[in-house]
Image (cartoon, helix red, strand yellow):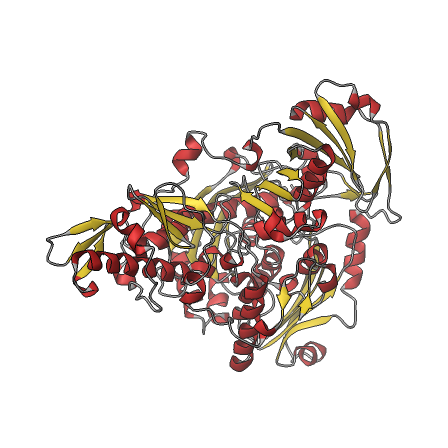
Amino acid sequence: MVKITRRGFLISGALVGGGLFLGISHYTNRKPVLRPGPGESVLNAWLKITEDNRVIAVVPQAEMGQGVFTSLPMLVAEELGADWSQIEVEAAPVDPLYANRTLITASIEENEALPGALREIGLWAAKGLATVLGIQATVSSTSIRNFWIPLRQVSAAAREMLIAAAAERWSVRPGECHVEAGFVVLSSGAEKLSFGQLARLAATLSPPSDPPLKAAKDHIIIGRPIRRLDTPHKVMGRTTFGIDVRLPNLAFAAIKASPAFGGRLGGFDPSVALGSPGVIDVVALDDALAVVAEHYWQAKTALDAIPVQYLAPEAAVSSAQLFADYRAALEDPDPYEYEKRGQPKKLFAAPPAGSRQIEALYEVPYLAHTCMEPMNCTADVRQGSCEIWAPTQSATLARDAAADLLDLDDDRIEVHTTYLGGGFGRRVETDTVRQAVQISQAVGRPVQVIWGREEDVQHDFYRPMAVGRLRGLISRDGQVLGLASHTASQSVIGNFVGRIAPFAARSEPDPSSVDGLAFSPYAFPDYLVEHSLMETPVPVGFWRSVGHSFNAFFMESFVDQLAVEAGRDPFDLRYELLARRPRFLAVLDQLRQASHFGHWSGDGRGQGLAIHRSFGTIVGQVADVTVTGDGVRVERVTCVVDCGQVVNPSILEAQMESGIIFGLTATFFGRITLEEGAVVESNFHDYEMLRLGNTPLIVTHIMTSSAPPGGAGEPSTPPAAPALTNAIFAASGRRITRLPLARYF
């Protein structure tokens, strides 16, 4: 038995024994984890029913705008047989029962290069590890994918328990009863009882081991554009985000960290602040200074007045030097090989007569998250316990961070997950949690830490910068003979694991570095994916779509260039390379028709195509642009998405639009620049975002599919950049290989 953190995610016999293939009993036959309120009956860890016939769906995923507080309750309502008007939602407590296992298993499930037996063994081990770790996390577009079956199963089990309770009340067989819009109805129609009338009795019954799930043809809630449960609360200002938390005796803290990565806090004079109105204390952290006051603006004003010295790190990196180092890394004779098909090295060393080699070098910068809600956390450290209110993407990691700092057992830490004003991977980090816990402990009262926008932009965990060289061979008759890619970037997973569990950190292999390149659906006869790992002081982390965000730009830009060089239509070349991928072909067909491809051309107008698969979802986009002397304007983006079975089409459409706007923002403006080890950009005046006036019309088409659900929150971001840059080439003949577009226009 190995203890892998202080509290111990224990990996032992669970890896070779039971509990790896979780049945419904894992989710239902467990000690109670929910506390029933007045008039509530707990049927299992996922739902409660009240005496007045309300159904409370318990959701373990964080709501950050992506709609999980609606889509997951839709699964509950469908299988339970509830009326949608009954449904309410409640955030789940922190418990391993609510673990997101898909965040660990997804990379294996999506690795098509693994032989069947090896895939099954890998999934077996990954599921076991995920079960033991028990991490609740809202990342990698996994919410629906992870809970699609379990949440329906536990709801179906609750349905059968309600039916059994009614049958007992009426002294009939359960088969003589059925559910209908929040009632259990006697098949004869003579009697009916509401869920609220049956809940107390039902909660005393044992759940069935294998409740039947409804067939897709019988769904009345899943697949419909149901209104979001959180919208009325947001419109009325009743939604509690992290920054809205208010507690008795609450103080506020402003933070100023070392400008340079790796810097430490040096000298400072607290007396300047301690005499200011409302100031309670000045707290020194390892790399930052905090001022605590009765109100946030008092804290920030006092902090700004303190002269602070920071001890700079020995190495002060700059963007110019980093890009030079990254380009030099592409000459590495022994990079890490992630995938090889055929004999690509032999092909490129001795290309066939008459073939032509095409080569392109791509560069993308670091990117910040810039969530609209400022980074924040509220902590109340007491003797022997701690309570946290945080807009976090992982309540588990927030709890663990506090437990580590305070040397407390997990059950002494209570985490309340608030609504998140944007996440994009940033809020899976625990830096603000740690700061709030340390400061609350120092001042002896509850404290809310709030970051200013400058702190946010200059102390993020950034999307890695990356460079890539792609080479392709085209035959005399326009066929693509092979493709080789060599990229260089930092390891996101290595950096992240190094922060939360340094003993387990490793940087290579990191599949996220080559997401979108390795295991490409394109049928290149000879194919090579290589990567050089870069180490820099700049902290990197998960950013919407992770490695797909830049590798899709590399791949789809280069495929477009191959089509042009081969004299091929960009759709036709992709049809050929995806000939054995019917779902891709269907997306391309729908996209070509819906975008009227070829009709937006001449006078500086052009259309660009990109198609990409990520997080189990295929997204194709065509961008219509106009290029003039004043710059580039995106007029329209046509999006076609196949994400398997769709829970809520209106939420899916909103997520496609959101991801496209996020991707276009990065393509036009996104750039974090380093000078002397510090970030130059500081706020939205120099780290710009797409505004309403330059946001294009976005038209989304959803494919009908019976495949298992894929992700929705991230897959539309990767194709946005190459669709736009390919359109710019079509309009102007200018091939974009470095982002952002601000470099060019």
Q: Position of residue 702 (x, y in %)?
A: 38, 55
Q: Is residue 269 above or below residue 163?
A: above
Q: Is residue 667 above or below residue 284?
A: below
Marker count (numbered): 0
Instruction: Where is residue 39? Give x, y as percent.
Output: 34, 42
Q: Is residue 110 visible?
A: yes
Vertical arrangement, residue 519 with respect to residue 630, above or below: below
Q: Nearer the viewer, residue 531 or 422?
A: 422
Q: Position of residue 283 (x, y in %)?
A: 77, 33
Q: Is residue 675 left or right of residue 380?
A: right
User: Can you say whether 8 is above or below 398 in the image?
Assistant: below
User: Whole-percent x and y of residue 308?
Assistant: 84, 31
Horizontal arrangement in the rendering, residue 27 relative to residue 196 (left or right): right
Q: Nearer the viewer, residue 351 or 100?
A: 100
Please tell me in which quadrant of the rendered image residue 438 appears.
top right
Image quarter (top left, top right, bottom left or bottom right) of the C terminus: top right
Return the residue nearer the eye: 464 or 701. Answer: 464
562 or 140, nearer to the observer = 140
**What residue appears at the point 51 percent right and 65 percent down from the top-left corner?**
568
* Relative side of 235 to 166, left or right: right
Q: Quadrant of residue 189?
A: bottom left
**Residue 725 in sight:** no
Quadrant location of the N terminus? bottom right
